[in-house]
Every structure is written in C-alpha cells, then in structure tokens.
Image: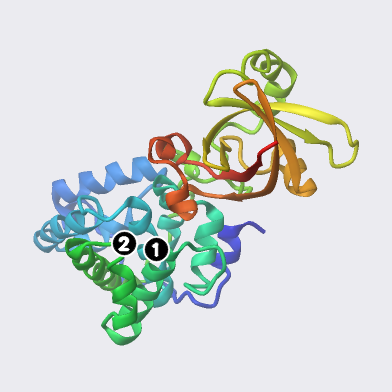
Amino acid sequence: MNAEERLAASPRWQHAVPPRIAPGGPAELGPRTWLMAKAMALVAGTDGARLFDLPGRDPRLMHRYLRFAASVVVLGRLERADVELVTLRTAWNIGAWYEFFHHLHLARLGGLSIDSVERVAEGPQSPGWNPRQAALLRAVDELHARRAVSEPTLAELRGFLDQSRLVELCLLVGHYEMLGMYLKTAGAVPEPGAWERGPLSWLRAPDDSDRLAPPWLPAFNKRLTNRVQGLWAPYLPPYAVIVHRGRRSGREYRTPVVAVRSGRLLFVALPYGDRTDWVRNLLAAGRGGVERLGRLHRLSGARVTDVPTAGEAVPPHARRLLGLAKILVAEIEES
C-alpha cells in the first residue's frame, strides 16, 4: 500500500454517496467555464474537472470566485511549498478528500515529497518539519479550531513572514475551507484516473519514490552511462561520485550523481527516486564517501528529505536544481 492509498483509507474523509450535485454540462456551465473544465481535465488526465463543473453551475459567481482564488493561490507572495502545505493541512482538517487528493500530487510542484505530504496528516508535532513548516501548520490548525492565530504562533510566523504574507496565509486557509465545504456538500470525489495520464502524469509515482525518470533508466545508466560519467564526474561540479558498499555483497561501488555542497552538508538530487541501489546502500550502512573536485571525503548521517523541509540549509542557487524530487542530505567529514 502506497502513501496515497494509506491516506485515502483514513476515516477522516466524508463523502456524500451518491453525490448530491451532478456536474454541469455545456448548457449549465456556459462555453467559457465548460472550456476551462475541459482544459483542466486534459492537464489532470481525466474526463472531467469537478473544481469547475460543480461550482461552475453559477457561471457569474464562478468567474468572480476564480479571480479571488488566483490571487491567493497562484499570484500570492507565499512560497509555493508554503501554499501547498497550508492547503493540504486545511483539507485534512475539514475532511475534504477531493482537495487533499489533488494537492497530494500538485505539492510536488512546490518541492514537497510524498513523505512530507503523508506527515501532514500527523500535524505540526510530527518529527521532521523545520521551524517554518511547524509554525505554518500550527497556524492552520488554530485558524480551523479557533478562527484566530494565537499570539505565540503569530510571533513565530513573524520570523518567517512579513505582514502581507500573514494576510495571505489567513485568506488562503479561509479560501480552502470555503471551497472544501461546497465540494463536500456536493459529494465531490477525485476523478477516476487523475494524474495517471496527461502532461503532468509524472507527478504520480506509484511507488512513493518521487522519481522523475522512467523506472528502466537507472538500470540502463548502471550498465552504460555511469561508466562514461564516472571518468569526469569526480572533477566537474555539480557532478560528483558517491562511493558506497553493497548491502549484501559488501563490494565497493561508485555512482555519478548531481550534488551541491554547502558548508559541511552535501545535497544530492534523486531524479530516480529514493529506491535506487546506491541510496539504499548508503542509508543502510550509515556511511559512505563522495569524490568531488578531485578529493575524496567521508560521508555520514545520510537521510532523504526534500528541499522545503531542508530549508535554509540548501543554498539559494541550488534550490531549483534540486527542487522537484527528493534529495539526499549527508554530512561531509573533513579528512
């Protein structure tokens, strides 16, 4: 059972069965809203888009709502990862599976891994959040329970957010609570096959690895590409070579990777996900090595996370390079 299936099985979600409101067709939606629903369906790889064809039954109100939604969700000043984290926790709090399901996958566009998404269900007390993320999650919970952010949490948030972003945070939570109330009342459930096809199907890795590449590519690289890259990767950043030992064989292996160093930390992109042999070898051993700029260093404390959770430790110039997949973080031991 993968993370999506575990989350879907939670008793948190409430669905109206059968759905209480039917999706609108071209006559009810009008040509503009109907075309927008079709466009969204093409992106999500589905036959319909409940976000448009349910509230779109009132086209006049729908288009005014969309302008507001775009302002707080897409055009706001909060970081993309913050928006997704707040959205997911809001959907969890109100039991809106439709909202949570779609952002479970869209969160990858903000750099959140499926592991972080699953921890959203545990809330701000879950180990692994950085201080910014924990404060955001507490604020969402307080807005849901008390309709106000407490003074201690507000003081924490002021260390990360300016006044305009604090306003956006409150409006963002209110927006998704409002939308979730309607979608739950209508009985909206995720469209069959969402994110399994279409241009963004790569967002849905069924094995929780968050890989970007096709599953056959690591084996191909191991047999061919790595042998070529291994000649120059130890000398030419952002490439490096990870030195690791097989979990069963005990043999030493060398794997070229894309890696960025910041102080004593090494950040390694995982476009093939976290189920590749070299990652599992390094995590199992707890130690390894990296050859970079012609020098060999020992590695320790390896762990898998994502860029938003690693936070300020990731250098700004490397955030885009490392941002769409999981990353491996390890400490470099100076020789």
Q: Nearer the viewer, residue 278 or 301?
A: 301
Q: Amino acid at mark 2?
A: Phe
Q: Amino acid at mark 1?
A: Arg
The single residue placed furthest to the right in the displayed view is 249
Residue at mark 1 = 132
Q: At 59% from the left edge and 45% from the top edge, which residue is drawn?
A: 329
When asked about the image quadrant of residue 181, the answer is: bottom left
Q: Are marks 1 and 2 in contact (CB under 8 Å)?
A: yes
Task: Find residue 212 and report its horizontal and vertical position in percent.
Answer: 53, 36
When asked about the image quadrant of residue 5, the answer is: bottom right
Q: Quadrant of the N terminus?
A: bottom right
The answer to whether residue 185 is visible is no
Q: At 61% from the left edge and 29% from the top edge, which residue is drawn?
A: 257
When asked about the image quadrant of residue 221, the answer is: top right
Q: CA distance from mark 1 to mark 2?
A: 7 Å
Task: Find residue 208 and report its horizontal and vertical position in percent.
Answer: 61, 50
Q: In the displayed structure, does residue 94 sit left or right of residue 261?
A: left
